[in-house]
Amino acid sequence: MKHFTKGFLFGVVATASAVAGAVFSFKKKVVQPIEDQEARFEENRKLANRKSHAAHHN
């Protein structure tokens, strides 16, 4: 019974770490680039809006 408990706990820890690694990898490869691109678009939109307002005030 002692070997079963050790094996079971090791399996639980290994599975949990594999799931955590997959989630972290997905976030780095998929979610973060989308967020970075959205931030760039937002910054460009703000700059274009400022330029537009500045051009009309002269």
Image (cartoon, rainbow, N blue to C red):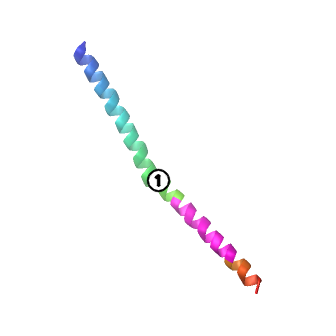
Residue at x-position 71% and y-position 78%? 52
Left or right for 58, reference 1:
right
- Asked whether 49 falls inside the magenta stretch, the response is yes
Q: Which of 22 and 6 is in front in this view?
A: 6
- Quadrant in the rendering for residue 49: bottom right
Helix, strand or loop at disc 1? helix
Residue 49 versus residue 5 in the image, above or below: below
Residue 17 versus residue 40 in the image, above or below: above
Left or right for 22, reference 10:
right
Residue 26 versus residue 3 in the image, above or below: below
The spot of residue 30 in percent (x, y) is 47, 53
Q: Which of 22 and 13 is in front in this view?
A: 13
Magenta span covers which residues? 36-50
Residue at x-position 52% and y-position 58%? 34
The spot of residue 29 in percent (x, y) is 43, 54
For this orientation, the residue located farthest to the left is 3
Residue at x-position 60% and y-position 68%? 43
For this orientation, the residue located farthest to the top is 1
- Quadrant in the rendering for residue 18: top left
Q: Name the residue under label 1.
A: 30
The amino acid pointed to by label 1 is: Val
The spot of residue 51 in percent (x, y) is 67, 79
Split into 4 quadrants, where in the image is the C terminus? bottom right
Residue at x-position 76% and y-position 83%? 56
- Asked whether 22 falls inside the magenta stretch, the response is no
Task: Decide whether the magenta segment is chiefly helix, strand or loop.
Answer: helix
Q: Which of 54 and 4 is in front in this view?
A: 54
